[in-house]
Amino acid sequence: METIIVKNEPPFLRITLNRPDRLNAINKKMIEEIRTVLEETVKDEKVRVIIFTGNGRAFSAGADISQFKELEGLTAWQFAMKGRELMDYIENYPKPTIAMINGYALGGGLELALACDIRIASDEAQLGLPEITLGIYPGFGGTQRLLKLVGKSRTLEMIMLGERISAKDAERIGLVNRVVPSNDLEKETLNLASKLAERPPLAIQLSKLIVNQGMNSPITVGLNMESLGWGVIFTTKDSKEGVNAFLEKRKPNFKGE
Ligand SMILES: CCCCC/C=C/C(=O)SCCNC(=O)CCNC(=O)[C@H](O)C(C)(C)COP(=O)(O)OP(=O)(O)OC[C@H]1O[C@@H](n2cnc3c(N)ncnc32)[C@H](O)[C@@H]1OP(=O)(O)O
């Protein structure tokens, strides 16, 4: 891989964006490489959690601005779609995803973090959507995902001003789940990931699907999916294991069956 470092350390798969001299700016190659790794890993039962992070002082400073010079109408649309399709794929990935935000998460970099299930940030991280300062606006799904996460006026403030906010402020508005001292970022992320890895994979997959669908549907649709999903979840061995373990006063051992 040219643009990412992939560490398969079951139960985790860590994808480190790796263009540190460009603050991990996202180019076409990086989009393709992330997609390839995720597709290869989807059926790997040993991997239960995906962690995204960045090499150096940035998570990612956004889409690679140097590639914008070549863009025209059609190619701009194609590049935006390529990135957006990756973000959609990450959002709907059947395993839990964590963005471990070690530094700048800007533009397309923040949009990648927004597509993850959980964002955990270093207290030194800065987040923002500075596209407006380039005369453009977010194009990898950020207009919609940020809206759903923090509401309309905070989204518009971030998009229209294009200013960076601190990790603490991001936590206050619900943009990141938690902020930790930079020295503890890895440890805290792995703690969180370990807990997720112990949870039943099929119940995680199904609840993620239902929550994601619920974000984009009338509440009755989400509620019906929730109820119908119960018919599925009760067919799994893990649901029996969870209930039996509780009744037998022992720790459950979920196998994703
Ligand atoms: C059509 C598709 C739509 C896609 C939707 C997404 C759009 C976007 O994401 S647009 C990009 C949004 N991001 C930005 O505008 C941030 C740009 N970067 C910065 O403002 C700064 O680099 C900084 C504040 C993040 C850090 O500043 P500083 O500490 O002074 O570091 P440098 O500016 O010297 O950066 C080091 C090195 O990295 C290059 N670089 C940084 N960001 C990008 C980027 N997004 N794309 C390409 N290159 C980037 C920067 O040019 C420096 O390179 P050298 O000068 O060659 O050392």
Image: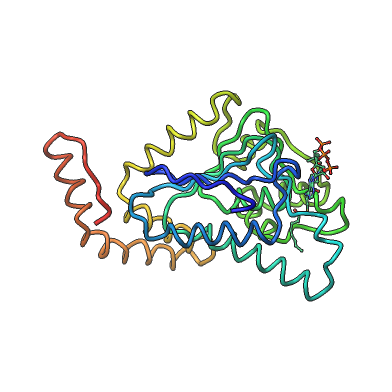
Q: Residue furthest left?
A: 248
Q: Nearer the viewer, residue 130 or 56?
A: 56
Residue at (14, 45) in percent of width and height: 244
Measuring from the top left, give residue 12's x and y in whole percent. Answer: 42, 44
Query: How did the renderer colour the structure?
Result: rainbow
Relative side of 168 to 177, left or right: right
Quadrant of the image occupied by residue 138: bottom right
Residue 78 % position (x, y): 72, 72
Q: Nearer the viewer, residue 116 or 24?
A: 24
* Front residue (pair 161, 187): 187
Locate the C terminus and report the quarter of the image it occupies.
bottom left
Q: Position of residue 47 (x, y in %)?
A: 38, 49
Outermost residue to the front: 2
When the figure is inspected, residue 119 is found, relative to residue 145, above or below; the finding is: above
149 lies left or right of 69: left
From what the image shows, is residue 82 above or below residue 114?
A: below
Tell me: 10 left or right of 5.
left
Residue 87 rendering spot, x and y as whole percentages = 59, 59
